[in-house]
Structure formats: structure tokens, C-alpha cells
Image: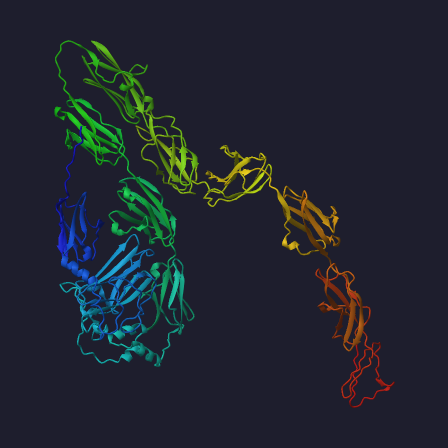
Amino acid sequence: MPEPTKKTVSAFTKKPKTQTAEIGATVIFEAETEKTDVKVRWQRDSKDIASSYKYTISAEGNMHSLTINNIVQEDAVGYAVIAGVSKVKFELKIKESEVKEAQKAVSPDPAIAEPKPEEPKEAPPAPTGSSASDTSGTVSDGSPDTRQDLTGLFTEKPQSGEVNVGENITFVARVCGESLLKKPTVKWFKGKWMDLASKSGKHLQLKEHYDRNSKVYTFEMHIIAAKANFAGAYRCEVSSRDKFDSCNFDLVVHGNKNNYISVCSCFVVRDSLLSYSSTDAGEDSGELDFSIHSFTEPEVDVWEILQKAPPSAYEKIAFQYGITDLRGMLKRLKKMKKEEKKSAAFLRKLDPAYQVEKGHKIKLQIEVANPDAEVKWLKNGQEIHPTGRYIFESVGNKRFLTINNCTLADDAAYTCMIGDEKTVTELFVKEPPVLIVRNLEDQMVMKGERVEFECEVSEEGAQIKWEKDGVELTRDESFKYRFKKDGCKHVLIINDVTKEDCGHYRVKTNGGQSLAELMVQEKQLEVYQNIADLTVKAKDQAVFKCEVSDENVKGIWYKNGVEVKPDARTHITHIGRIHKLTIDEVKPEDEGDYTFVPEGYAFNLSAKLNFLEVKIDFVPRQDPPKIHLDCMGRTAESTILVVAGNKLRLDVPITGDPAPTVVWTKGEKVGVLTDSDGRVHVESTKGHCIFTIEGAERQDEGVYSVIVRNPAGEDTADINVKVVDVPDPPEAPRILSVGEDSCIVQWDSPLFDGGQPVIGYVLERKKRKSYRWMRLNFDPYKETTYEAKRMIEGVAYEMRVYAVNTIGMSRPSAASQPFVPVAPTSEPTGLCVDDISDTTISLKWRAPERIGSAELEGYGVEYCKEGSDEWIPAFSGLTERTTVIVHDLPTGEKMQFRVRAYNMAGPSLPATLQQAVTIREIMQRPKIWLPRNLRQTLIKKVGEMINLVIPFQGKPRPQVTWTKNDEPLDPKQVSIRNSDTDTILFIRRSERKDSGKYEVQVQIENVEDRASVNIQIVDLPGPPQNLKVIDVWGFNVALEWKPPKDNGNCDITGYTIQKADKKTMEWYNVYEQYRRTNCVVSDLIMGNEYVFRVYAMNMVGLSPEPCLSKDSFTHPLVSRSVIAGYNATLSCSVRGIPKTGVCECRHFNPFPVTEGFCLRLYHFF
């Protein structure tokens, strides 16, 4: 039967039409819908329009309108209105004269814009709408712009420009929004204080738009039909939360001698108030009133006002009173003496600002002059009272305000007041970075379903940003995306997903981000149970039933191509996946072809209803019973299938007069079938016998026999019933191999297929630490081996399988063992031959450049003969080293070698030698490579270890010979170890006799090489010899000695001389590192007896024993030669007990003490 067609009906009874308008005008498009509750969307260039200052959208009943205000050239594009599935397109056109005029205004003639000689110097010209660097941060009056705090928000700043009277000009500012969580706010000013937002209208238009690809906000100020009084200084300010940026620019208007009007003259001062005209509606809306008003300015003392005003108000006062030389006045004001009034209430005020992290506490402190003074604390002008979070403390003349658990609401201005005096500070609450606690998860859904991406952040109320493929998702698209917050949880909801919604979705915070992938698949609708033809009698019930795979699919029933409407006898039901059409008390007119058409799918299900008309003829004789069945027998064609859990109802038509008795049996069992749980019911009516089993089970399967008897005879029929069910779940799947982002999984068929053949399998995967299973295929997969792709390398996954037959889907199998997708490493690098002999080869290589997320298990080395493809492992297992020696190779053969790296994913690509290698030893001359430190004499101390490693080369292996002073070495004292590449001389404890010249020789046949090493073993020196006192005079003594006999096999570097008084025998150093063999010891005490000793020193240290002096220090009289006229002193030392008397004699006569002679006696004990 052909599928019935439906007539497409438009949702609009009145459609909007294309209109032509002038620039600056307002246009209204109207549409009327058939129904009042239809949702209508307006679009511009296929993008939805939202209500704003530019567009006004209204709806009253079934009337809908779109109003476009202040039309410009860019509005001349295509528009559309959408209601349900109906879409109507229309256009807005601009009159050609207006277009030419607009183009002319955008590109003014340079000749006209050329400045005149008599005009003042102008700013450099710039193309309309272009950007330039910021001006110097000043305006026309020369005062600094104190509000300009550049933080780099502008990517392009407005540039000064020129325009002729009556023409148009556009100023453009661009802001990068990639690092901003909220849309920036932009304000345009004329001069310093005139906000141009209220002036938008006929001559001024402000526009803005956002580029999702570049994430740049563009703000435009259009000045239309410029007038002479529009000239002057302008400013553009942009702010976003705690960031601020500002830019100044100028506008020059040509065509009038009075092009430049003082910005100050644009403002009218009346009663000390700044006023200007502004209209919000009407024809002149948007007129910038910069005209000069004549008025009488009251006489005021500006100096007095400036002295009393705070510095922040200087510029405003300058504009208010027409001050042009503000800087000069400020310089003079600084020179004026101003008495600073000290606070009588506060000894210490609050700091200008405080900063605290969110959740921490902060303490504000002041000091008051009067310890008994009462203070008030205010927050943003509102008094604070003590609570659990606000704690007031008073300690002496100190007052404290403690704020516990600071939140963003505490970011405010705080004031402390004592009487009329106050101190003010500002508290900044620093918000910590918001972290993502629970990441987004990948999802695979069917087309038309609803998707929810959910994440959890560390802070409630945190600002986050959602992106799709790098493009931010905003609330302007609320018809498609919805954003939900629940405490720390944030949810992105996508309704009615389509294939265009596939992609990567990202959530960003100021402390991290999370990425997930959305995959959307289209699934064909499957029919699990088709509707069947029915043959019913009058007054009976006819039930058409079908079951489809999607429980959300709706459908329409048709009879002979006409839609079936529910009524008292006809009932249409839809429960889950089952659709039913029930007709009570069937009549002859109900006979026909019935069709079920699923909505959205191009196929239908058809069945026929046959009306059975029963004619009763009176027969006076008896009729034998007869069973009227078409499905008798035990063949497959006559088997009745019933799904486990459903009701089994066997309605058998019978005839016979008189009415026969009915007996039901199963298998060999005779008698009426009953069940203790009441599932079996047998019912006989006129012309029918009905056998019912509630909730069919697997054991209900078998051959049922019905026997009818009456006095005229009997009849028997067999009915084969088969109970089918969903299959058993397969066993846990096995992971055969893994790749970089894929794996191969295998499983076994289920033990029981449910009575119907398995038509395929459905697989699911999940991350090991997740609870969300993601389906990998929607159509049944017929094989038992599947390659799962699009996984993340290094993340653990699990797999499970469902079995599917015509009845339905089994329960899931047990999860597979966790596995991690990993890729084999890259091939090893730098493979080369290190050495070769007649039967061996030494190979070396470097680790792979890319290891991957799995650790490297080792390397495998293989070889083969040239021209062969049979690779033979060089050894069993793997090696972790990057060098290997392959043994037992055939001499003279050309061999090829390769190395592969292994990890849990398997072997990497092989690294192969560029060409085959011949296994044959290469002759090499012997050569000794003497290390640089051994080219000089090697000095060691006695007892130290000597270990000389001398490398050499030569093939075949050379013969090594060591000698000392041309004599063989003593093997008891010296050990020699040789290898293929070096020789080692080892002495465990060196002695003086080990000093000498050691020579090593390497020889191959008649070719040799030699090298020598000089070793010097040094020891401590012996003591010096013959220490004696040579001379004594005054407080000095001269010593002399000879060098030691044994210098320790190295040069003597110096001597250490010590002295000791015999009374104490405490030794003191006189000289250290003294190089001569004689010295003078000074500062001795006459009368004391001293002992001297000397140590010898070399590079090893001091000699173990010193050399002691044998003479004592005495001081007899010594002859002196003096010069006439000079002083002379004769001294001696004596010792005696008891105290000795001293007498000075001259020529053996007592020496008289006269003038010029002095006798001094010193007694030493």
C-alpha cells in the first residue's frame, strides 16, 4: 500500500515583504501566524536577532513585528522569520541616493579636507573607521587626563579624524574578549564629562558587535551629517570588572572659519551647575548641543574654590569656570602655604587600602587620642554592628575591627568615625582561582536527544565560560543552549541535538579547563513486531499492535489512506515502544487496509482487517465437532511464538452441535492444564475455546493439544508454542591489543540466544573511574571482534557487550579487564656498528624519540642474511641496554641487522642498518691513547692506591707488555689487567720503591706502539740536622741548622721554628713556611733559659720528628764598639740563689754612678 502523503501548510497567514527605506529611518516588518501560541524567531543573515536598542521585537496574539531603528547601510541584508517548520525570507533595501551619499561621507575628498592657512594646527588626518595609537592622554585644554589608567584592554584605539560639514565619519574601538569572563562596557564622551549615550539619534549612532571566531568586540561611533560645533576632543572608556582603559581623540570639522570651538564653551554655567540640552525623542533626537550660550557669569574667587577643593575635583572646577591654564594655577597653588590640620581624634588612621583573600580574616586597626572615645564602624556608609563575622575590640587607645571569613560582599569602603572626624579605607577581597573538581565526560547520543554536560568547580557562584570548538557559547543563543547552576555544579544543556552539534565542548574557569567530545548519530528505526492481518467476527474486538525500537517515536494510523480518529469504539494507545489500534464491536464497515506511519521515517506498516460474517442455518441433526485452525501441526511455519513475560492466548474456533466439551493437554499429560500460581486459564464460549497463560516462561514451551468431543464425534488439534526471550549476556570481553587511541576487543557468543538467532552486538565503554557508559555503536554489530577508536592515550578504560536478537537486547556482560590505550614507541635512532670480528658484531643505538605514555620494556635485536626475509632473534627476551654484542655469526657472510623497541603496545617500527655488514674482522694498527694527566709525572703519597687505565686500539687484539725502568714488574706488588680496548696497572698500597718510569707496549705481529708513565711516590721528610745557637745579643738569638738527610722524595718547601721556656716547656711557633736554614729569634726574656726546635716541611707535610737545640740561652757581657756622643748599653744576665749582688766595675774598679751613667738592675727568678 503506498504511503499516505501529508499536505504542507504554512504557519503564516500574513508574511513580511521586502521594503526600501532611507538611512536613519525606522522600518517595521509584520507577520501574522495561524495560531496564537506559536514561537516566532527573527533572523538576520541566518543569525537570530535579539531585542536591543537596534532591534525591537514584539508579539500580540498572533501578530508579530520586527522594528529596525536608525537604519544604516550595513542593515541592507537578508532577513527571515521562522515559525515551527515554516520560514519566510525578505530583504531591506536602501535608496540609491542614500547609498551614494553614505559612501561619499565615508571617503571625503582629500582636497576639501586640506587645512587652510588661517586655521589652527590640526591633528594628522586618518581614514574613517581606522585605529591609531592613543594620543598623549590630554584634551584640548592641556590638562592631564587623570582617569586614564591603561591596562591594555584596547587592541585598536579610535584615531583622530577630519570631516567636512554635512558628511559622516566613524570612530572604531576594538577590545579582545578572550581573557574576559564578561562583556566589556564602553562609554563615549565629548570633552571630559558629556556622556554621548543619551545623544544617540539623528546625528549620532553607537554600534557594537562580537566576532566569535576572533573573540573581538568592536564598538563604533557614527557621526552623521557633522556640524561645525561637533569639533573638539572626545574620549572612549572601556571597563571590565577590575580592568579599565581609556583613549582620547579629536574631531576636526571643516567648512566654517569657526571650526574649533572651545570644549569649555560647549557647557553653560548657570548657578554653578553644568547644563546642556538633551532630547530623548522627536525629530531632533541626537542633536549634540554644543552651541555657545550667552550668560552672565557670577563673580567667584576661583583661588578660594581650588584651595578648599580636593585634588580630584581640580579638572571639574577648571571646566566649570572656564580655566584654560590649569597647570600654571596648580603650580602657583602648590607654592601657597596651606596649613594642614592635624586630627584631634585619631593618633593613627586607617591605611588607604587593605587586601585579603576570600575566606580569610582581616583586622583593621586605628589609634585614638582619647582612650574613652567611642567609635563607629561603617561599611559603604551603613553602620556595622558586632556579629559573629564582625568583631569589635578595644585595647587602650587602640580600636580593632576584625572581619572573619571574608567574602566578595565584604569588598567595600570602610569608615571609622569619632564624632565628626573620620578615617576611610577600602578593602579588596581577592578571589582564589576556581578549579574544576569533576571534569566533563565524552558523550555519544542519538539525533534529537537531550544532552547534559556537567562539571563541578571548587567555588559556588563562580564565573565560568562554555565553548564549542573554540567559540564561546553565550546566552544570546538561549533557544539552543541552556546553562544551569546548582551550587558548585554547572550544567550545559543542549536540546534536540543534531549532527551540527558534534564537536569538542570546553568549560573554562580562571584556574583551569576541561574538554569533552559530543558525538551524534542517526539511527534507523527498527521494527521489533509488525502488525498482522486480522480476521474477526461481528461484535468481536480487533487489535492491531506493533513495536518499534524508539519509544519516543510517534505515529499515525490510517484506514484506506484516511487518518483514523479516536472515538467511542476506536482507541489509539502508545505505551513505550508499543503502538496499538483497538476497535471494539467490529462491524462490516471496519473491514479494510490499516497502516501505521512513524513520524519522521519514510516507511509504514500495513495489515488487513477481514470481517467474518457467520451465517447460522438450522439443522435439526447433530454435527460432529470441528476445530478450525490454520496453524495446526509441528512444523516451523505453524509454530506460535510468544515473548517471555507476555501473555499467551490461544483462541481456537470450534463448531459442533451440541456444543462440544474441550480438553487441553501438553505433551503426554492428559487432563485440564492448571497451575498453582493461577497463570493458566481455560475458557469456553460459544464457538470458541480460549487457553491463556499469564507471563509466559521458558518452561511453557512445547506442543499443546486441544480435544473437542460431543455425541456426534470428536476432533483433535496440536499447537506448537515456542517461548522466545532476549539472549543471555555474553561473557566478559577480552582485549586482544591496544593502539594509541584504539583497542581490539573480542568476545564469545551467549550460551543461550533466547530462542531467536543473535543478529548482532552493541558495545559500550567507560573510563575506569567514571560511572557513565558510552555506546560505541547503535546498529547491531554482527562480528565478535570489534575495533574501538577515539580513546585518549594513557587513560584506563573498560568495555562491555550486549547481545541483540529480534526480541530485544540482553543484559550487559561483565566489564572487561581495565586497559590503557597506548601506542608503540617510535623506532630507535642512531643504529650503527660499534665493533666487528670474525664471529661477533657489536651494535649500539639511542632510545626512541617518542616513548609515549607506557614505559619502555626493552629492545629486541634480529638479524638475517642478505637477500633473505627470515629474521632471527639475536637472543631470547629483551635487553634494556642500548649496546649489544651478537655472537656465533658465520664468518664472511653479509648480514643485515635491525632493532625494535617494545612497550605494552608491542614492538615499534624497526631501525635497520643502511646496508648489509660482512662478518669479518678488520685489521687495525696498534695505537696507545695516553691520557693527558699521565703525560706528566704522576705524584702519589705513600700508602695511596695507584690505578692507571690506558686505552689503546688494534685488531686483532694486541699483546700488552709492562716494564719498570726496563725491568719486568713484580707481580706481588703490581697487578696488570688487560681487555680488548685498554690495560690497567693497579697498586693497592704504594711504597717509595714503586717510584720510577713505567713503560707499556702494545704489539700486533711486527707492529708495535709504546708509551711511558713516570710515577713519583712521596713521603714525609726527615728532621733537620745540627740545630745550634750561633749568637746571642740583647733579647735575640741566632739559630742555624742543616737540611734533613731524607727529603721524602720531593723538595723541601720550608721549615717551622718553635721556642719553649724551660720553666713551662710550652712551645710557640716563631716562623712557619720559613725557607732559609738560619734565623733570628727575637723578643726573648733575659735571664730565662730557652729551648728551640725545627721541623722540615715538604708537599706531604711536616717531618714526624723535630731537631732540638743543645745550647741554653745565657747572656754574658759582650764587647761593644760605639761612636762618641751616642748611648751605649751593656747588658748581662746572671742567676743565683740566694739573690746575687751586682757591682759594676771598670778596669776591675767599682764604677761610679755619675751624671751620664745609669745603672739598672733586673732580677729574674
Examine the image and state in which quarter residue 1056 appears.
bottom right
**Point 38% across, 35% down: residue:** 787
Question: How many numbered marks are there?
Answer: 0
Q: In terms of depth relative to the viewer, which is nearer, 516 or 872?
A: 872
Q: Give x and y (percent) for residue 587.
A: 13, 24
**Rendered location of residue 200, percent (x, y):** 19, 63
* Quarter of the rendering containing residue 102: bottom left
Q: Is residue 580 above or below residue 511?
A: above
Q: Is residue 995 above or below residue 647?
A: below
453 left or right of 836 in image: left
- Residue at 82%, 70% (x, y): give it: 1111
Visible residue check, residue 881? no
Task: Find the residue positioned furthest to the bottom.
Answer: 1155
Q: Is residue 741 visible?
A: yes
Residue 699, given in percent of the width and then of the height, sits at 34, 22
Q: Position of residue 714 (x, y in %)?
A: 23, 11
Residue situated in front as seen by the camera: 816 or 80? 80
Residue in view at x 31 percent, y 74 percent: 310
Taking the view exactly as shown, the residue that stands out farthest to the front is 1006
In this picture, residue 662 sits left or right of residue 843: left
Q: Is residue 242 left or right of residue 711?
A: right
Q: Quadrant of the N terminus?
A: top left
- Left or right, residue 823 beside residue 989: left
Which quadrant holds the C terminus? bottom right
Q: Quadrant of residue 1094?
A: bottom right
